[in-house]
Amino acid sequence: MAGADPQVMPDLEKAILSRENCRRENLQISYRSKAPIIDCVNALFSTVYASEDYAEGDQLKTNEAFNTDGEKSCVEFLLYDGDDEMSRPEKTAQEMEAVANRIRLLVSGSADWKPNFRYSDGFQPSEYNNTYRYSDILILLRRTTNQSALEHALQHAGIPYTLGGKGRGLFSRQETKDVSLFLTAITNPDDALSLIGFLRSPWIGLSDEQIARLACSKTGFSIDELKASYDEETDVIDRYAALTGTHLASELVRMLIAETGYDALLAGLPRGEQRLANLRKVLDWLRETERGAQTTTAMVARKLAEMIAEPPQVPEAALLDPAQNAVTIMTVHGSKGLTKRVVMIPDCSFSDNGDKGFTRIHENALEIRLTNPDKTQAESPGFAKASAAAKAVRQHEDKNLFYVAMTRARDLVVTSATVGRSPAGWLKYLEPMIGNQIPAITYTELAEAVDRIQTSPCNIPTEAELQAALNQLPAPPKNRNLSASPPPALRKSRMNWRNMMRFTPPLPRPPSPPDRKKCRSYGLPRPRGPRTAGTEYLAGRHLRMAGKTEKRVRRIQNRRRWPVRTD
């Protein structure tokens, strides 16, 4: 658990061993990983931890039932070999591109890029019927700072992925932001950024040049001019703003989706199925939020915007397909207890930002640090000692997270880092072993190997084949006057009326009050209400009551009390 005291478990162990008939039993045999991974993990963490924290009794042992003789090294490091003067964001983008290339080689590359044994009810030789899929791969992140760069690289490589764990996935997705832009634009016309974002979004699809033309004034770009002239391009904002008093927020979003085909657009994008599931989850969130008598569309829009500004721990929508073939991305904290065939750990070089809090609790004492008006700081006598103890706890927790990340894989562990001026984070533990127990693969080697992947040829139809297919289509109708079909309720009422018009109405005179029970002979309920003379009231009354449901119409037809028109 993040921020937990690592000394709790050792203290609990001492308390248990102090009792009678208690002894320590080390569970060292690994039923998850193969021997090359176990050997590398033991060698690595013998230097990461102190000797007393990772003694011989703490090291993992190979399961003798797993036979992987002749297996190659199963822990890799992707080495940066580009220009050292590139900016850190550019280096991060190249690192994530290398991760995507390694995934492609594992799934579609030759046998040289795959382990010799793949786990399938035990470790079996990797061959045609025992090959790797995207669903075998888990990407673990120490932090989510560079997650957007990773997702961009996977999308560019055409690799399907899904976000797992309790990440901030839902309210950071573009489909959620699009819904927020729409609701804010129709409820808060003074929000200029939301107005521009909505006009540029797939809802409207205006280009930057069109928006600049609408906002052009004598003094340059004017928001007031844009607010006054956006209706030249679209009337969506005004039409839906007029409905905010009579419709719920979720209803407005559904109406706009049906009008613009926004769901069809999402289905055609990468991760289309996941995007549609996220859209449905956002609509469910809207329905849950708008419950209550005092809830308005503007309040829902403001709350959704707050959720996007500070995303809570709400993951993306779960796809209910257990056989989905997609890479899983999650944080190391959320991966405890999980097992995957291949685990990739990018962004191993990170800096410890430290704890900038002004309070510390150490040895049952509260230590504080205050900032004076002149920006100087005043600390209590034990604050420095408490800060050192808190830093030691964070470092020990960071080592434990590294151990969790390195022991999730069965077949292969792939690490990488954005190299800076000096190794930081987990890279400082990996660096002494890179090139020795951990082989290094350069970005250039990965890019060249990906270019050599044999892709299946695409059968493009010729012009003659396209013309032959067009000739097989049926001829268009002569009358091309298309009319919109009526709503379902209107179609149903018309059908009921046609069924009723099949009957000729030789109705009797309205029964007298004592003889009202005779109405039962016609198969209709007894008329109620005022007694009006003439057959017009009785026929209209009976026809309206009989036409309410198809079931009643069928009942009348079956009784055949009245003759059926035959002409």
Image (spheres, rainbow, N blue to C red):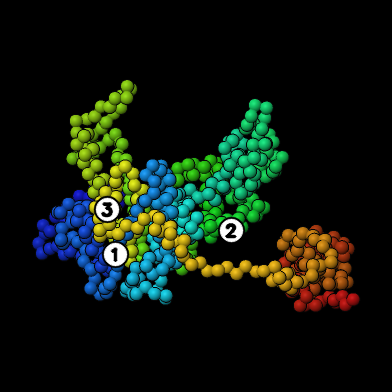
Identified by mark 2, the residue type is Gly
* Label 2, label 3: how far apart the Cα atoms are: 41 Å
Kindly identify the amino acid type of the residue bearing the numbered disc 3. Leu
- Residue under pointer 3: 430
User: In this orientation, which residue lies closer to the viewer: 89 or 269?
Assistant: 89
Q: Earlier in the sequence, mark 2 or mark 3?
A: 2
Asked if the residue at tag 1 contacts the one at tag 2, i.e. Cβ–Cβ closer than 8 Å, the answer is no
The front one of 92 and 3 is: 92
Given the image, on which type of amino acid does mark 1 rest?
Answer: Ser
Local SS, label 1: loop
Pick the front one: 279 or 287: 279
Q: Are marks 2 and 3 in contact (CB under 8 Å)?
A: no
The residue depicted at 19 percent of the width and 33 percent of the height is: 382
**Disc 3 to disc 1, how far (Cα)?**
15 Å
Which quadrant holds residue 519? bottom right
Report helix, strand or loop for mark 3.
Answer: helix
